[in-house]
Amino acid sequence: MLKKVIVSVAILSLVLAAGMANAAGRDYISIVGSSTVYPFATVVAEQFGKSTKFKTPKIESTGSGGGLKLFCAGVGVEHPDITNASRRIKASECARCAKNGVTDVIEVKVGYDGIVLANSKKAKPFNLTRKDIYLALAKQVPDPAGGEKLIPNPYKTWKDVNPSLPAVKIEVLGPPPTSGTRDAFAELAMGGGAKKIKWIKALKKKNKKAFKKIAYTVREDGAYVEAGENDNLIVQKLVANPNALGVFGFSFLDQNTDKIQGSKVDGVSPTFENIAKGTYPVSRPLFFYVKKAHIESIPGMKEYLAEFTSEKAWGNDGYLSEKGMIPMPDKERGKFAEDVKTLSILSCGDLKK
Amino acid sequence: MNKPGQAANGGQRPIDIVKGGMVRRHRAERRFKIYGLSAIVLSLAFLSFLLISIVSQGYSAFQQTYIKLEINFDQNVLSGNLATANYQALVKKALYKLFPDVKGRGDKRHLAKLVSPGASFDLRKMVLADRHIIGTTREVWLPANDDVDMAVKGHYRRDVAESERRLTDKQLAWIDVLEHRQRLEKRFNVTFFTAGDSREPEQAGILGAAMGSFYTLIVTLVLSFPIGVAAAIYLEEFAPTNKWTDLIEVNINNLAAVPSIVFGLLGLAVFLNFFGLPRSAPLVGGLVLTLMTLPTIIIASRAALKSVPPSIREAALGIGSSKMQMVLNHVLPLAMPGMLTGTIIGMAQALGETAPLLMIGMVAFIVDIPAGFTDPATVLPVQIYLWADSPERAFVERTSAAIMVLLAFLIAMNLVAILLRKRFERRW
């Protein structure tokens, strides 16, 4: 027994020593970041790993904010090389990066993602406006009696919100506040709807914080159900409950078109073509950020960037569009491909505060 | 003096009171038994519901649809660098030959989509393994695309309008033709057991995650077993009873109840940020899980040591052995089965753990199968979580199949624990 213990301790110290030695260099790309970009980045990584001599990059799904935090922690092999984000980097995050020595960052926009509101095929499709969405889901809404006063959301059914909608109870399944999809939904759909009300729009110019509070706060009385980050689960729940609407990324609608249907928003259906054209209002850009200092030190970085920005990946008929990512217009694609080639650096001053 | 058997109250005999209450007492006893029985039936019902739902969803993942194609390993295509040649072209050519009347760019693209994009990697592997097949023509079974696979398995509804399906009418007709010509077949899904993760369901496998779990558990076992046993022996055999040992004991029991995510945060702060160990490595995963399983092993080992009767110790000391000899030669062998059982149960717990691994970066997309303790890796339960979150429909069944594999491992480990106990346990 004693011998065994000694042997195990010896093995362990060897293992630990090997671990330390290995940490000194890294022969694979380390990527962190948004769970929305994750399904697309993984496809590129896999393609890259199988078609080149390099190892397949490791991709962690940490969320946009978590990814930028890890990314900006410093330069060196123990820090990630690339972070994915479903929103643009904030000025504060850029400053944090600079403070930790991550001064040269390349910004690459990869495409767009639509956020859809969908319901079961068993029910009739919805035709909503962003104002309907705001009125149905905000915690506080303007008093229907008139005046610049807010009251707790009184609406129970969609018909209460807008007489042209069916008399169905408002029940929306969506992601929790930690999710980037939720942030984008609040900003684009609810915020867009709130701006349709004149005095709230005027408020945005005067007091941005107050506007955000009014426009982006989701009601908590049970009409909006936080269904977790798992979009598949939301799809399953929609099939079981034809009265409910669900909020998730376009790729999940794309994969389940035989079971669920997307609602029109402002008269536009959430189709691939409409999101690509930019007519569907609830869509957001997807990004990734690259540490320039790592491009030389980590093997395969240049090739990975080339793979991601190649036409066969992010082009109109590329394999990413197959997975549900909406490609950028040709001109924008050209610009970002050029940025990657010349490794042009993002300046924190360009970001809005 | 009352006569025996005659009650003081109202002339009722005690036996009558007892008899009078008998029916009620019997009823109460029956009820009590039924409560217990129904609790067992209920939990069995939940368990079987769980198992049935997982197995009924997951069993089809052990099969995968393959399409047989007559591949011509064309010399013109396979010239130059064999690693980067256009193998996709070979697949397309074979498909077009099979359906010569398919014209038009759109139709041809739809036709090519029947076969998995991974088929070209299969062909590359074949060519790199044996260069003599260049220039020959062979029948090759290639994996079908996940949408085709789902349609063949009946997971897609065919009766909805064409625009609402992942497959077009033509594609469904081609599938039927292939099936009719016996060129389409469901076969055992070898890839599922031999590949790492992939974003294409038909190329995704659990070997990567299983190996990650294996390396992680090795580290956990190598660390937690000796440390746990040594701690238990000291506390049980050598430590004086005073308030320090009491304090240690209370803390060990508390540690066993600490939520596992806390160990993950500790691992992040200590192993990654302070020691600078690599992220996503089984080494760090094992270290964190060691912290989690240690209390379980210490408690089980102490119980095993306690159950060895004092007479053994006294006899050993009585014939002149030292305390160390007494422990190593007499007490430890008798306590070992109990200790091993506790260790295996602790390991099984560690195998199913995801929360602490989240913090140290083991929730990641990893394609390459890890080959060591510091390679990036993920573990089985994390793989299940990642697949459950993937949009592709075919991952639903693969998620359930991965759960079945994990359950099989857990059952096997618990079975070993039971066997060890049955085989070696001694009753005093």
Image: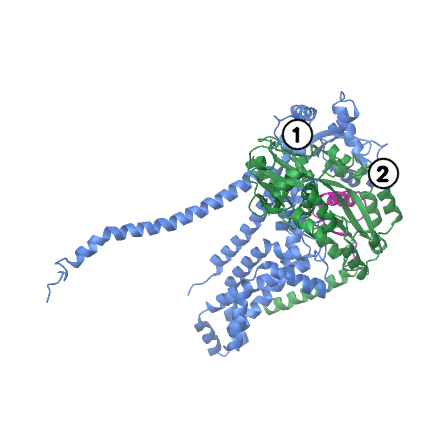
- Percent position of residue A1, x then y: 58, 67
Residue B192 as seen in the image, left or right of residue B136: left
Question: Chain in blue?
Answer: B
What is the span of residues highlighted in magenta in the rendered image?
Answer: A25-54
Q: State the residue position of label 2.
A: A331
**Is A45 included in the stretch rendered in magenta?**
yes
Q: Using residue A22 as the reference point, say whether residue B305 is left or right of it.
A: left
For label 2, the crowd category at 10 Å Cα-Cα, with few meaning under 14, some 14 to 19 and many 20 or more, is: few
Q: Which chain is indicated by disc 1?
A: B
The answer to the question of whether label 2 and label 1 lie on touching residues, with beta carbons closer than 8 A, is: no
Residue B164 placement: quadrant? top right
Extreme-top residue of the structure:
B101
Front residue of A239 and A190: A190
Q: Position of residue B227 (x, y in %)?
A: 60, 67
Q: Residue furthest right?
A: A342
- Chain A drawing hue: green
For the N terminus of chain B, the image quarter is bottom left
Q: Residue at x 67, y 46 (%)?
A: A215
